[in-house]
């Protein structure tokens, strides 16, 4: 066997496998090229979700006749020259393979001019130039990709439904539009306008143009500057949630990226404010020295690597948390970073507790500080939620006591309340602190869950029909799933552009939550491509439990406390609230005696 160099056309076709996964990848690469070319207006026209045709027209700097031809060579790029440049990337593209790859798997035409002379018109088929002519001199570039994957049938077969592919494209374009509020985007599908942004530089306006005005009204601005990072954007008030993470957009130096790290930092800031399995709407722009971020780790550059990832996470968490705690007037827990938490000496801070008592802590409007509870390491680490493993330990103890086996927590007797928030209780095995709000959420959650589990399948009509405004991609899915939606009792009547009327809904929808459940349902379809009513009921039970629970800072007398503890004991899972936070912290008699050095 001899080693041969692959012909260019074949090499490009192989590379296309990495870069051009689906129509959305083509749209991404072409639109990013237009942005790199300093366009201020970009038009995207699609036919059949891009599989039949994708046309991108921009008003950027354009290309000279020679560059037009060079652009289709592999590793042909105007964006980097030396390896030093690779560490200072300011453009979206730099690998010089997108055009070559796209051309390799389609029939493509390119028309481009720098505005000073006649333009160039090239036609390619499977990566080979088949005709060259002159064209008009309008400055900018227009690329039309026809019959994508015409020569890679295996890839074509792998495409999902047109709706799914179109969903990917609109999701991508939404995020690109968020990353570039200074650019005017216009998107058409089969001749119909999908959305348009104005290019006014106003991010909130773009959010309103894409997610609708109702969402925009509930967004809070955030801004934070550190030595290394400039963070700014908009985050939703905690009351506005979504069932999927698709509404969280993180942008680094103008590039939309997917980052589990940044997502985690955002979720940490919302911490206890969101019900479990609910996600916020967030658009965050982060600017940093390009040397701090490696974009060359993923062929489509969707994932990146940060050299100061912890600092960045910290900055994001703090910026968002500060805004949210101001907004919600919740008591500000003096949160230390994960990093500090791990290294900090664990001691009881008595002085802090004393100070708090002096303050009027019931005045919720004054944001106050509760120092995070700390104590020496115990055998059962009381600082930790009671974990699955610890359940046994606790129920072992309860077994000693005259406690009903069915219950997973022992009987305990309230002795008082701390800060209007925690029930203090005792029994022979020691001392307990119970978060009263979390406890009640758990009780209500199990109650509603059971109630929603056996609904009577009937519909009830609304006196005042509900009207909804959806995003374009949501509306596309509603149309696709109209029959399935009707089967679960919802009839979506069109009402102008992307708006719908609902006149009746199933009886299991609890009052006041109809709108949220319907929105969740639509989101579920967009995300999962199916309808899962069981999941919806679960999410609804959590929301109900959260809404109708007593809040912290509420005085309870001993009878109230006792009642709550008995109810808690009856639950199936008394250890964590539906958001996953601990309900009970236990100090065994042994631990207490050890702390006071009564025993060594
Ligand atoms: P990369 O973007 O990584 O440089 P591409 O294959 O996407 O590689 O594009 C190759 C080159 O073609 C770019 O470097 C740029 O010079 C030129 N080019 C592509 N699209 C446009 C456009 N819309 N306007 C101006 N120049 C473009
Ligand atoms: Mg490119």
Image: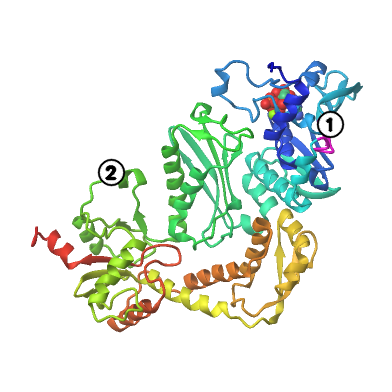
> Which quarter shows the C terminus?
bottom left
Write down the region rendered in magenta: 142-151
> Which quarter shows the N terminus?
top right
Assess disc 2: are there few (<14), some (14-19) or many (≥20) residues with their C-alpha within 10 Å of its C-alpha. Answer: few
Residue 193 shown left or right of residue 588 in the figure: right
Q: Position of residue 502 (x, y in %)?
A: 73, 72
Identify the residue under disc 1. Answer: 108
Looking at marks 1 and 2 on the same chain, the residue that comes earlier in the sequence is marked by: 1
Secondary structure of the residue carrying numbered label 2 = helix
CB atoms of marks 1 and 2 within 8 Å: no
Q: Give the colour scheme of this rendering.
A: rainbow
Q: 408 above or below 143?
A: below
Q: Position of residue 16 (x, y in %)?
A: 72, 32
Identify the residue under disc 2. Answer: 343
Instruction: Measure the C-alpha gap from mark 1 to mark 2.
Output: 58 Å
Residue under the point 21% across and 76% down: 427
Closer mark to the observer between disc 1 and disc 2: 1
Q: 511 above or below 183?
A: below
- Asked if residue 50 lies in the magenta stretch, the reply is no
| Ligand 2 - quadrant of the structure image | top right
- Asked if residue 145 lies in the magenta stretch, the reply is yes
């Amino acid at each position: 066997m001899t080693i041969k160099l692959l012909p260019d056309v074949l090499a490009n076709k192989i590379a296309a496998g990495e870069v051009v996964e689906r129509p959305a990848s083509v749209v991404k690469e072409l639109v990013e090229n237009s942005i790199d070319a300093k366009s201020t207006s970009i038009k995207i026209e699609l036919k059949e979700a891009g599989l039949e045709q994708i046309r991108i027209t921009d008003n950027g700097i354009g290309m000279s006749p020679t560059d037009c031809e060079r652009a289709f060579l592999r590793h042909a790029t105007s964006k980097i020259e030396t390896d030093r440049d690779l560490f200072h990337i300011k453009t979206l593209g730099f690998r010089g393979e997108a055009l070559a790859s796209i051309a390799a798997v389609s029939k493509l035409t390119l028309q481009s001019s720098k505005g000073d002379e006649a333009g160039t018109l090239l036609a390619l088929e499977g990566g080979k130039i088949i005709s060259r002519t002159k064209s008009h001199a309008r400055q900018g570039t227009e690329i039309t990709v026809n019959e994508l994957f015409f020569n890679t049938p295996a890839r074509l077969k792998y495409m999902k439904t047109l709706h799914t592919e179109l969903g990917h494209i609109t999701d991508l374009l939404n995020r690109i539009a968020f990353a570039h509020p200074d650019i005017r985007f216009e998107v058409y599908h089969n001749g119909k306008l999908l959305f348009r942004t104005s290019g006014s530089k106003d991010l909130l306006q773009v959010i309103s143009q894409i997610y609708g005005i109702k969402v925009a009204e509930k967004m809070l601005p955030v801004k934070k500057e550190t030595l290394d990072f400039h963070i700014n954007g908009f985050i939703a008030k905690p009351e506005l949630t979504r069932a999927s993470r698709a509404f969280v957009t993180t942008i680094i130096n103008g590039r939309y990226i997917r980052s589990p790290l940044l997502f985690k930092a955002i979720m940490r800031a919302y911490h206890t404010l969101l019900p479990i399995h609910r996600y916020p709407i967030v658009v965050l722009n982060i600017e940093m020295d390009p040397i701090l971020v490696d974009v060359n780790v993923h062929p489509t550059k969707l994932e990146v690597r940060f050299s100061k990832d912890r600092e960045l996470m910290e900055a994001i968490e703090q910026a968002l948390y500060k805004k949210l705690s101001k907004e919600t007037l919740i008591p500000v827990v003096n949160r230390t970073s994960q990093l500090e938490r791990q290294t900090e000496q664990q001691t009881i801070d008595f002085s802090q507790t004393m100070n708090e008592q002096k303050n009027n802590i019931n005045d919720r409007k004054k944001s106050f500080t509760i120092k995070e509870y700390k104590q020496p390491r115990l055998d059962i680490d009381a600082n930790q939620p009671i974990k699955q493993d610890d359940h046994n330990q606790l129920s072992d103890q309860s077994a000693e006591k005259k406690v009903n086996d069915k219950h997973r927590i022992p009987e305990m007797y309230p002795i008082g309340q701390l800060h209007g928030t925690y029930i203090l209780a005792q029994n022979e095995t020691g001392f307990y602190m119970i978060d009263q709000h979390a406890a009640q959420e758990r009780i209500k959650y199990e109650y509603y869950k059971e109630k929603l589990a056996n609904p009577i399948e009937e519909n009830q009509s609304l006196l005042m029909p509900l009207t909804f405004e959806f995003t374009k991609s949501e509306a596309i899915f509603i149309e696709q799933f109209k029959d399935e939606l009707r089967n679960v009792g919802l009839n979506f009547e069109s009402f102008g552009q992307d708006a719908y009327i609902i006149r009746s809904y199933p009886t299991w929808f609890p009052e006041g939550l109809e709108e949220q459940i319907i929105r969740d349902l639509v989101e579920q379809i967009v995300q999962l491509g199916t309808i899962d009513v069981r999941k919806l009921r679960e999410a609804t039970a959590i929301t109900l439990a959260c809404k109708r629970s007593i809040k912290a800072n509420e005085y309870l007398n001993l009878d109230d406390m006792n009642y709550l503890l008995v109810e808690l004991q009856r639950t199936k899972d008394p250890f964590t609230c539906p958001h996953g936070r601990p309900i009970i912290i236990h100090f065994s008699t042994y631990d207490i005696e050890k702390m006071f050095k009564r025993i060594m």
